[in-house]
Structures are given as structure tokens and as C-alpha cells.
């Protein structure tokens, strides 16, 4: 049956049927028309249907004086419907785009509130989807952007759902009138300096006057592009499965890909795979800034190219590309004396160091490379540490963080490097566990 031929409550239930076993359905409740209808629909369905526990969350941005009264309005609506409400006040960071900053603050609150096995329901509808596609088209978005808002996606430890994407604004208005609902009219929704308001009040009326089905056909295009993006995602999974090979330095705990496989792909396929890989780690570059990838990919000889992105850097070493962020982009503080080598040593901003086996005589000290270090090796005499690291192919970005164990002024060991990490005769070795930090954005 065509969902558009089913009444609104039944259609909503149908769209939410895969999520009936969730622990909680939490409605993002602004107090506006769309979320008021969604809340009312669910509260009344809960009287006759076995639904997960319902609750609502209202995010107060504090951007306009009129908004100070909205939490009270939302509270009264929720009390009348018997739905508990959480009000969260957020700080919107100043910036060029108030719309974007408010959205980031709002979704930060949603992420914080959404726990495992919980679902956040938002009330975007088909008209919103059409506006999103046209807005992103004006910004030069690719297939992913033009696919519009997904019906579902992970959020925090749970999921975000948009169960009204096949419902029009007119249908919501009709439902609200039939049930005599009251809602908040946000004054900023009439301000046409905001791009979405301009599209809604200026562009779409002109489009629908000429093409009455414009909203439906644009939303349908978003669905087609969503399907195309799904195929690109599948292709990225295939390519990344080949590129995520086991490497000698996996113990660094850093995301990396095999460059020798990536360069066999077409340029467009490289960008597709890398975009998919980088998406959870950083904000992606626009199409004008992918030259940084080409410079890194095509570097020759001993060059150590770096592609700097919004939230970290991509490095090239040992036939692989590596993602670095957080502490990896800074020099660790000095470590100093290891007073009790029988116990693990927490290195400031650089993980944990452990000595196993027969602990060498002290006093012992941990240092990092400064240049010019010499190490005595059995049967090889004194060797320059830089050459030893070159022989083992240690990535350049890791060399300044490798813990070095000294006995007085004598370099005894380099953590984790076979043949350099301890004494075969003494039966001990030096093991380093780098910081297990978040390597990107949550």
C-alpha cells in the first residue's frame, strides 16, 4: 500500500515500526507546529498502542527574548499530554552563521541526552527535505549533501529518526487545525536574511506556482540521490577493506590505510574512499581543497608531506597514510626519572611504559629524541639512532614520541622496536602503550 494513502497516525506508526522495541522515544520538541503535531500524534497513539516510553526534550538557545517564554509553553503542552519534558539550555558560539552555530549547539544537547537503545525523533517533513536539497545545491554539495536528511542515523549512543519525511507541511497544518493545537511561532522564521527562510518564503512559492508538484519531485530526487550515496558507501566499504591491511606499526593505535592500494584507484574513487574513512574523524574539505590529498599522494623521495584538515592531519610514511589528531600533533612533555621500574610509568600526554623481565640496574631515566643519540648494540658496536630508526622504517611523526630508556647517559633501549627494546641477555624489554585517545570527532 502507498504510505501516502494511509491516515497520518497509521503512517507514523508504519514508519516507526522497526523501532518499537527501543527503550525510549524522545521527541525533539521546539514548541513549533511540526514538533507539536509529532508529540500530539505519539501521545495519542500511546493510549492505544504498546509504544516505548515517551519523553520530550526542549533546547533553549537563548538567542532572542521571545524564546524565554517557550520552555513554559512546552512544559504546559507536555503536562497536558502526560509526557515528561527535559529543558536543556545551551550556549551558542558566536560565528559567521548563527543558524549553523545554533544547530551544532542543539545537536550537542541531543547527543548528550540520547543513551543506548534510545531514539530521538525529530519532526522534519517533506517540505524541509526539499528546502534542504535546494539549499545544499546552492552551496555546491556533492551526492551525500544532495541526498538530503537521512531518515535515520546514529546519534550519541542511540539513533535519530525522522518519521515525517513523507508528510507535507500542509498535512501537518491540517492535523493541527483539526485537533485545535496551539504552537509557538518563532519570529525568526520570517527573517529572510536566513537562507532557509528566503527559500521557504521567496523561492518555493515561485517554484510551486509554476510547478505545483515541485516539493514532491525535489524530495523524490533527494531519495534517488540517497540511493546513489548508498552505492558509493558500498564501494567505499569494498575499497577500505582492501586498504585496511595489517601494518608493522599498528601498535601505534592510529588509523591508517595502505597507500599502494589507494593509488591503483581512479581519483574519484580515491576521494570516495577517503571521504568515507575521514568522515568520523574530521570535517571534510570542500572540492576546492582536495589538492592537499594529491600533493600527499604524489610526493616522491624522502618528502614528508602533510595534509592539514580541520581536526587533524594526514601523514604519509612507510607506504601508508596515517591520521593524526590531538596529542599526536604536539611534543610530549619531558618524562624524567623512572623511580620504580617494577611498576608501569604514566608518561605525561604519551601513554604508559612498562618494563618486563629482569629490571636493569638504576637509576633509570626516560627521554625523547633530540638528535645525535648513539646506541651500543651487540655485534654491531655503536650506532646512530637516526640510522637505526631509518632501518626499521619508523614513521617520522612517531620518532619524537618514542620513549628512550637511559641508564645515566647510556641509551639502553627504544620502546617497542625489536632488537632495540631491551636486552636478550638480561631477559627484559621495554613496552610502550601510546595514549588511547579519541582520534577525531565524536
Image: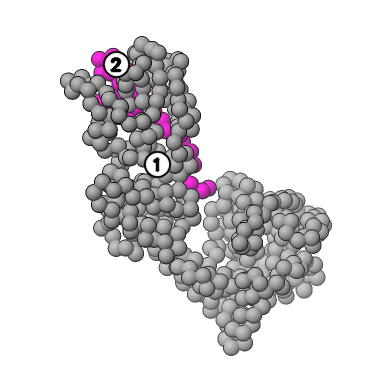
Of all residues, the one furthest to the bottom in this rendering is: 210
Compared to 246, does 159 lie above or below? below
Q: Main secondary structure of the magenta part?
A: loop
Q: Secondary structure at mark 1?
A: loop
Q: Is residue 331 left or right of residue 240?
A: right
| Quarter assignment of residue 379 | top left
Residue 417 counted in the magenta span: yes
Left/right placement of residue 233 relative to residue 69 reads: left
Q: Which residue is mark 1?
A: 254
Q: Is residue 300 left or right of residue 43?
A: left
Question: Reading the chain from its start, which is encountered first: label 2 or label 1?
Answer: 1
Quadrant of the image occupied by residue 198? bottom right
The reply to whether residue 44 is in sight is no
Distance from label 2 to label 1 (Cα)? 29 Å
Question: x%, y% of residue 64?
Answer: 76, 61
Q: Choose between 266 and 95: the one closer to the eye.
A: 95
Q: Are marks 2 and 1 in contact (CB under 8 Å)?
A: no
What residue span does the magenta drawing correspond to?
A: 415-442
Residue at position x 57%, y 49% in the image: 156
Residue 53 visible in the picture: yes
Q: Which residue is mark 2?
A: 427
Kind of element beneath mark 2? loop
Q: Is residue 234 rendered to the left or right of residue 83?
A: left
Amino acid at each position: 500500500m502507498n504510505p501516502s494513502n494511509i491516515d497520518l497516525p497509521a503512517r507514523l506508526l508504519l514508519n516507526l515500526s522497526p523501532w518499537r522495541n527501543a527503550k525510549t522515544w524522545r521527541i525533539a520538541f521546539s514548541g513549533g507546529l511540526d514538533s507539536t503535531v509529532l508529540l500530539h500524534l505519539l501521545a495519542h497513539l500511546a493510549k492505544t498502542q504498546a509504544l516505548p516510553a515517551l519523553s520530550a526534550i526542549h533546547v533553549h538557545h537563548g538567542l532572542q527574548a521571545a524564546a524565554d517564554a517557550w520552555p513554559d509553553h512546552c512544559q504546559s503542552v507536555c503536562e497536558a499530554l502526560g509526557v515528561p519534558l527535559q529543558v536543556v539550555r545551551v550556549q551558542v558560539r558566536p560565528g559567521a552563521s548563527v543558524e549553523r552555530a545554533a544547530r551544532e549547539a542543539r545537536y550537542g544537547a541531543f547527543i548528550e541526552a540520547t543513551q543506548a537503545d534510545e531514539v530521538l525523533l525529530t519532526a522534519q517533513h517533506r517540505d524541509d527535505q526539499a528546502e534542504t536539497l535546494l539549499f545544499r545545491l546552492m552551496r555546491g554539495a556533492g551526492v551525500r549533501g544532495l541526498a538530503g536528511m537521512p531518515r535515520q542515523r546514529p546519534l550519541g549512543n542511540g539513533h535519530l529518526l525522522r518519521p515525517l519525511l513523507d508528510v507535507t507541511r500542509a498535512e501537518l497544518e491540517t492535523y493541527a487545525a483539526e485537533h485545535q493545537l496551539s504552537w509557538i511561532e518563532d519570529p525568526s522564521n520570517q527573517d529572510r536574511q536566513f537562507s532557509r527562510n528566503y527559500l521557504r518564503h521567496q523561492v518555493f512559492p515561485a517554484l510551486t506556482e509554476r510547478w505545483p508538484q515541485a516539493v514532491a519531485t525535489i524530495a523524490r530526487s533527494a531519495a534517488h540521490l540517497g540511493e546513489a550515496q548508498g552505492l558509493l558507501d558500498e564501494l567505499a566499504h569494498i575499497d577500505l577493506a582492501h586498504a585496511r591491511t595489517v601494518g608493522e606499526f599498528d601498535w601505534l593505535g592510529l588509523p591508517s590505510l595502505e597507500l599502494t592500494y589507494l593509488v591503483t584507484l581512479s581519483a574519484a574513487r580515491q576521494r570516495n574512499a577517503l571521504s568515507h574513512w575521514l568522515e568520523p574523524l574530521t570535517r571534510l574539505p570542500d572540492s576546492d581543497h582536495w589538492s592537499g590529498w594529491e600533493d600527499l599522494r604524489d610526493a616522491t623521495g624522502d618528502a614528508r608531506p602533510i595534509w592539514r584538515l580541520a581536526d587533524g592531519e594526514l601523514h604519509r610514511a612507510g607506504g601508508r597514510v596515517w591520521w593524526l589528531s590531538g596529542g599526536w600533533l604536539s611534543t610530549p612533555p619531558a618524562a624524567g626519572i623512572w623511580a620504580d621500574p617494577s611498576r608501569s610509568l604514566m608518561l605525561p600526554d604519551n601513554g604508559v611504559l612498562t618494563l618486563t623481565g629482569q629490571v636493569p640496574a638504576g637509576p633509570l631515566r626516560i627521554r625523547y629524541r633530540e638528535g645525535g643519540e648513539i646506541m651500543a648494540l651487540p655485534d654491531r658496536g655503536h650506532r646512530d639512532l637516526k640510522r637505526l630508526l631509518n632501518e626499521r622504517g619508523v614513521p617520522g611523526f612517531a620518532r619524537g614520541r618514542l620513549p628512550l630508556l637511559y641508564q645515566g647517559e647510556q641509551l639502553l633501549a627504544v620502546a617497542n622496536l625489536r632488537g632495540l627494546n631491551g636486552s636478550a641477555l638480561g631477559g627484559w624489554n621495554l613496552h610502550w602503550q601510546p595514549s588511547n585517545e579519541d582520534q577525531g570527532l565524536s
